Image (cartoon, rainbow, N blue to C red):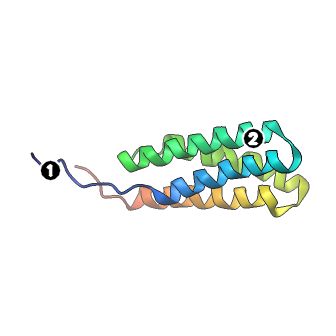
Amino acid sequence: MQDSGVLVPLHWIGFGYAALVASDGIIGCAKVRSVPSLAAGLLFGGLAGLGAYQLSQDPRNIRVFLATSGTLAGIMGMRFYHSGKFMPSGLIVGASLLMIAKLGVSLFNRPRQS
């Protein structure tokens, strides 16, 4: 069997981010009985998990992960701006911006194909 190329490791940081987003929705539901918070947390956590999986398969496939992180940064950024409370919106904004920065750095640091 021929080696097909470089193995790409699992994107553990991305899966951790996905777990953070999903757990934020679960905690929001448990604390204030907010079903929309649960639905949004699980939806965006699932999309972030899908994006992390896609990055594990192909490091150039950043669309889903970037769209998810960017959308969460925008939505939760507005919530943080209006409430001024760090938890949970400020935490998600910070994590989302870090993920966007990590995706940008990895995009520019990857080797060019000829």
> Percent x, y for residue 102?
52, 60
Q: What residue sits right under mark 1 in the picture?
A: 3
Q: Position of residue 99 (x, y in %)?
A: 57, 57
61 or 52: nearer the viewer: 52
Q: Nearer the viewer, mark 2 or mark 1?
A: 2
Q: Amino acid at mark 2?
A: Leu
Q: Secondary structure at mark 2?
A: helix
Locate residue 70, reporting x and y percent.
Answer: 63, 47
Residue at 39% across / 50% down in the picture?
Answer: 56
Q: Residues within 10 Å of mark 2 (few under 14, many from 20)?
A: some
- Compared across the picture, whether 79 is left or right of 56 comes to right
Instruction: Residue under label 2, please give it.
Output: 38
Residue drawn at 75 percent across, 41 percent down: 38
Q: Nearer the viewer, residue 43 or 104?
A: 43
The residue depicted at 59 percent of the width and 50 percent of the height is 18
Instruction: Determine whether, in the image, residue 43 is placed left or right of residue 48.
Output: right
Question: Residue at horizontal 85%, vertical 55%?
Answer: 81
> Which numbered disc flags the more N-terminal residue, 2 or 1?
1
Q: In the image, 25: left or right of 81?
A: left
Q: Indicate the secondary structure of the residue bearing disc 1.
A: loop
Task: Report the Cα–Cα distance between label 2 and label 1.
Answer: 43 Å
Q: Is residue 26 visible?
A: yes
